[in-house]
């Protein structure tokens, strides 16, 4: 369990920018505890099903043994057939009532447990919905930040374009100044030779 927590914590820490490592750790612990609880609930559910099957098999075996005993009694005591049939019928009715009462009680318990399990799953689903909403908010925030960076990049491109225009103008001005100075120097030299 501890290694799963560490792995999930490291992966999530690398995936997103973590401002509070304790909060990240608590989130991972809650997430893994919910997974473990879900597995526990599933195990309980399977155990209940297994117990019900076992109980049904025991009751079935009990009926089979009772039927065998009654068949043996019928073959041995044919003279008492009518009386035994009456007793068996009375016993069968009684056992049916008990079995039906037991079945009703087991159904009620199973339904109550099913309601509890459903509530737990609903709570887990609500928690996951809250986590999903939080991630959606974080994604929206990252989209906003990304849009801001895009705006800043556009501004830098505009400023860069202006600097490029200024650089071209400065280069042209410097070129004209060099040509002008060259013409003045040339005229001065020519003027000295002429005069």
Image (cartoon, grey):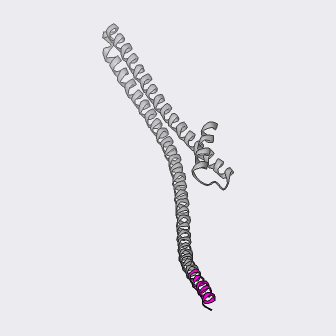
Name the residue at 37% across, 25% down: 92
- In this figure, what is the number of numbered marks? 0
Picture coordinates of residue 140, whole percent (x, y): 52, 63
Task: Pick the residue in front: 150 or 26.
Answer: 150
Figure quadrant of the C terminus: bottom right
Q: Main secondary structure of the magenta part?
A: helix
Dividing the picture into quadrants, the one containing residue 130 is bottom right
Residue 156 at x, y percent in the picture: 56, 71
Q: Is residue 95 magenta?
A: no
Q: Along the line of sight, which residue is nearer the eye, 95 or 191?
A: 191
Q: Which residues are magenta?
A: 176-195
Residue located at (48% from left, 42% from top): 114
Q: Quadrant of residue 146?
A: bottom right
- Residue 153 in the image: above or below residue 56: below
Does residue 161 sit above or below 31 in this rendering?
Answer: below
Is 146 above or below relative to 85?
below
- The magenta stretch spans residue 188: yes
Find residue 1 and report its horizontal and vertical position in percent: 61, 36
Task: Say left or right for 61 vs 125.
Answer: left
Residue closer to the observer: 25 or 59: 25
The residue lying toward the viewer, choosing from 20 and 154, is 154
Q: Is residue 26 left or right of residue 45?
A: right
Q: Residue furthest top?
A: 76
């Amino acid at each position: 369990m501890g290694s799963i927590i560490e792995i999930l914590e490291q992966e999530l820490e690398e995936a997103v920018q973590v401002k509070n490592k304790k909060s990240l750790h608590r989130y991972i612990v809650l997430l893994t505890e919910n997974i473990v609880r879900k597995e526990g609930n599933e195990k309980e559910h399977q155990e209940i099903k297994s117990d019900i099957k076992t109980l049904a098999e025991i009751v079935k075996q009990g009926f089979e043994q009772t039927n065998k005993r009654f068949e043996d009694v019928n073959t041995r005591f044919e003279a008492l057939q009518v009386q035994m049939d009456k007793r068996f019928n009375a016993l069968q009715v009684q056992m049916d009532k008990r079995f039906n009462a037991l079945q009703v009680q087991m159904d009620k318990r199973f339904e109550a447990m099913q309601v509890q399990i459903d509530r737990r799953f609903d709570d887990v689903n609500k928690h996951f919905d809250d986590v999903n909403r939080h991630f959606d908010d974080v994604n929206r925030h990252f989209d906003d930040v990304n849009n801001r960076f895009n705006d800043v990049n556009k501004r830098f491109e505009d400023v860069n374009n202006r600097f490029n225009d200024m650089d071209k103008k400065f280069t042209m001005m410097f070129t004209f100044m060099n040509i002008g100075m060259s013409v003045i120097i040339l005229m001065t030299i020519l003027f000295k030779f002429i005069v």
